[in-house]
Image (spheres, grey):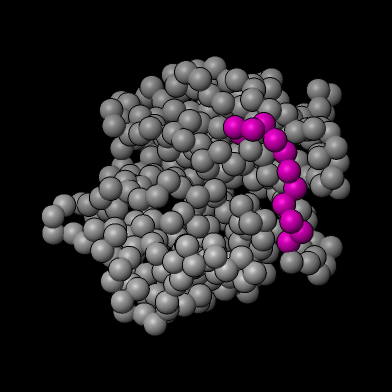
Amino acid sequence: MAAETSWVSHCFENFASGSVDFDSFSDLNDETDKEAAAVSMDLILPDDLLERILSYLPIASIFRASCVCKRWHEIVKSDRFLWNSSHVSSQKPWYFMFTSSDEPVGYAYDPVLRKWYGIDLPCIETSNWFIASSSGALAVSVNRATHSYNVSIVKSKQVPGNFFQWDLSIHLYDSETMTWVTTLTEVLTGWRAGDESVVCNGVLYFLIYSAGGGARDNRHGLIMYNLRSRSPHGVLMRSFIPVPCSLTCGRLMNLKEKLIMVGGIGKHERPDIIKGIGIWLLKGREWQEIARMPHRYFQGFGEFDDVFASSGTDDLIYIQSYGAPALLVFDVNQKQWKWSQKCPVTKRFPLQLFTGFCFEPRLEIAP
């Protein structure tokens, strides 16, 4: 554009404003007995190009870059840089690990730099060990363009006087209208909802668990609920999808709008005892196994409970035992398993529990 300063003129303006003088290349060639002069590239690059380069740095490196010099500090703190950073392709998801203590502290793991960072959270009055209670599942979907969001809650309550029947209801919150709507109520027989749910492409997926009332091969099942069309009452179980094998637990996650489930595989003769961990992708109404944890990694956790923590986004899946701070990372694209660096947190007593969740580190500008 004509109104913008050209790349060349910007370079000369930088030189004119500073006190740095450079010899010509012919002079440098003539003085072969002298050391080659080093020219700092940030003196040559215009601000907009330097901003783009810095915006591709890992989040931790961006904060360090602001301490390099005054010019870099001003760039990193500028609104234009934050806007550019928010439109750069997403970084690898981090994992935040914390313990069951009341102290609002934890450690965030950067898989790119393979480093842990201590993070103090705002003061929490009560324990927030679980995102949702055992009688309800919570899922959130966010529109990054408008910054609007929807909250989906699946509640399950036992029918009074009937051990095998559970009242299930789905409640939706819209941040634009700031209203709650109950979109479905239904009674399930022999099944109850739990605390595992996720939204993919406008569809709410949640696990249901056997409540007894008959012999079943699997203790888990998957329910789909379209948040756009909102299925009528009484047909929820028509969307039922059986899990691929007997599971000790299941963890649902959204990886690039695809539903992924990480599950503990139960022994054939004792389905409540875990013998391994599998990862499945839902295609239509069929499960496709994409990976199974090698036995050496499964043994690396030590004593592994039948339930565990797992979450993921983008191309990474994190798996963690509740009983130890060990963290295993699976790259879906490369089909590669890798241990994280050792977490700085230590186990202080035998019954201490650990958990965590993954998140995408981004620099965003609030509207």
Point out the image quarter for the C terminus.
bottom left
Toward the left, the furthest residue is: 2
Query: How many numbered marks are there?
Result: 0
Residue 333 among magenta residues = yes
Q: Main secondary structure of the magenta part?
A: loop
Q: Residue at x 28, y 28 (%)?
A: 229
Q: Quadrant of residue 233?
A: top left
**Residue 94, horizontal then vertical, whole percent:** 57, 54
Residue 40 among magenta residues = no
Name above or below for residue 358 compared with residue 37: above
Name above or below for residue 280 compared with residue 362: above
Magenta residues (range): 332-343
Is 128 situated left or right of 323 in this image?
A: left
Is 240 situated left or right of 277 in this image?
A: left
Residue in front for this viewpoint, 170 or 166: 170
Q: Quadrant of residue 81?
A: bottom left
